Image (cartoon, rainbow, N blue to C red):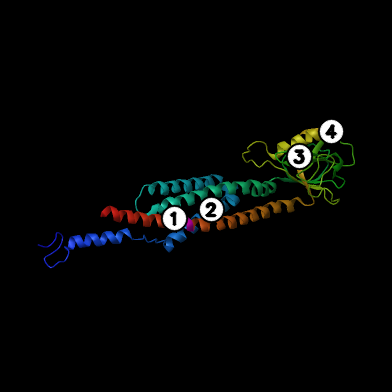
Amino acid sequence: MPPAGASAGGEQEPLVQDFKKDTRRLKGKKYHVNKGLINTLTMMFVPYAIFAGLLLFYVYMYHLLFHVAWLLSLVVVLISVVWIMSDMFTVTGGQWYVFFGVLCMLAGLTATFVGLYIYFGYTFQFYKLGGLRTYSNVLPAEPADSHADAGKIFFTADSKVDITRAVGFQAQGGVYCVAPILDETQIARVNYWAVGRDCCNSRASFNCDEAWNPDAHAGAVIVDTGAPQVSFNQLDFYMKGTKEAAALYDLASADNPIFVRWVLDPSAMQAGFWVAGWWECIYWLIGYFLVSMPLGYIFNLCAAKRAAIQQKELEYDMM
């Protein structure tokens, strides 16, 4: 009598034979990783495009459409969250949208913070100086309140920075330098101060901008950026420096003095803010590109490997 599982001719029954054959094949099977060219390019370039577009919008359009800028950031974050949550618990596809959503959210948040940093540090200064008034032939004795709306001030030819009565106020890892702007007449109250950062010693030293240039008689006004501050802003530190200088050199300072960068041409400094902001954008765009491309490739590879593993697990579950 033939053994169990075999036919009269000595051959295995087909069902048993197929079962054993499939079991052996599955135990030694290696999962196939299909990275997909479209998925790879999407994972690499779409988050970078979000970063670049949002960054440039913040830097150059925030002064006109700040509410639209914040709305765009919110939309990017919300869509990224939807992508992440929609694919968080799926058992096929390798949770590709989770990886993709994380990259898009990272790009949106980074662009928002970097864009605000560049805008308030550079672009805002350019637009602010251009939007304020320009005064010419100003005497240092003239009250600061009479030029409260100034963006550029051209002083009289005999006006100069009194380097001998400069003070460096140390705060938050930097030295905030102040020096009174005077002329040949006796001034009862200092209304205008030349300022700078990390360009002086603690006493009687001032090398900021063009303080040593005898042809320089103008100032680009330091304006409040309007950005939220963690503690103090630079105007607070300059004000503290003026109080220290007034006490040290027996000077009287205006209650609300005007702080300026002492330069030959304030318009050139204004243009310099625009150029500096542009180069800051270029550096960040290049830097994020170098990070985003390999990160996108790695995330897509992780999703593809997970999709292959999930497929193998499904094949086992179907046995």
- Whole-angstrom CA distance, mark 4 to mark 2, is 50 Å
Q: Is mark 4 on a helix, strand or loop?
A: helix
Give the residue type at disc 4.
Leu
Which residue, given by chain and number where applicable, does mark 2 sit on?
51
Which residue, given by chain and number where applicable, does mark 1 sit on?
302
Front-most of residues 14 and 268:
14
Give the residue type at disc 1.
Cys
Q: Where is residue 76 in the image (x, y as percent from the top left)?
A: 48, 48
**Picture quarter with the N terminus:** bottom left
**Which class describes the residues within 10 Å of circle 3: few (<14), some (14-19), or many (20+)?**
many
Which residue, given by chain and number where applicable, does mark 3 sit on?
258
Which residue, given by chain and number where applicable, does mark 4 sit on?
248
- Whole-angstrom CA distance, mark 2 to mark 3, is 38 Å
Residue 246 in which image quadrant:
top right
Kindly give the residue lying farthest to the front in the view shown. 1
- Whole-angstrom CA distance, mark 4 to mark 3, is 20 Å
**Circle nearer the viewer, 1 or 3:** 1
Earlier in the chain: of badge 2 and badge 1, it is: 2
Main secondary structure of the magenta stretch: helix
Q: Can you say whether 104 is above or below 148 in the image?
A: below
**Circle nearer the viewer, 4 or 1:** 1
Earlier in the chain: of badge 4 and badge 3, it is: 4
Q: Which residue is drawn at 56% across and 52% down?
A: 55
Give the residue type at disc 2.
Phe
**Picture quarter with the C terminus:** bottom left
Residue numbers of the magenta segment: 297-302
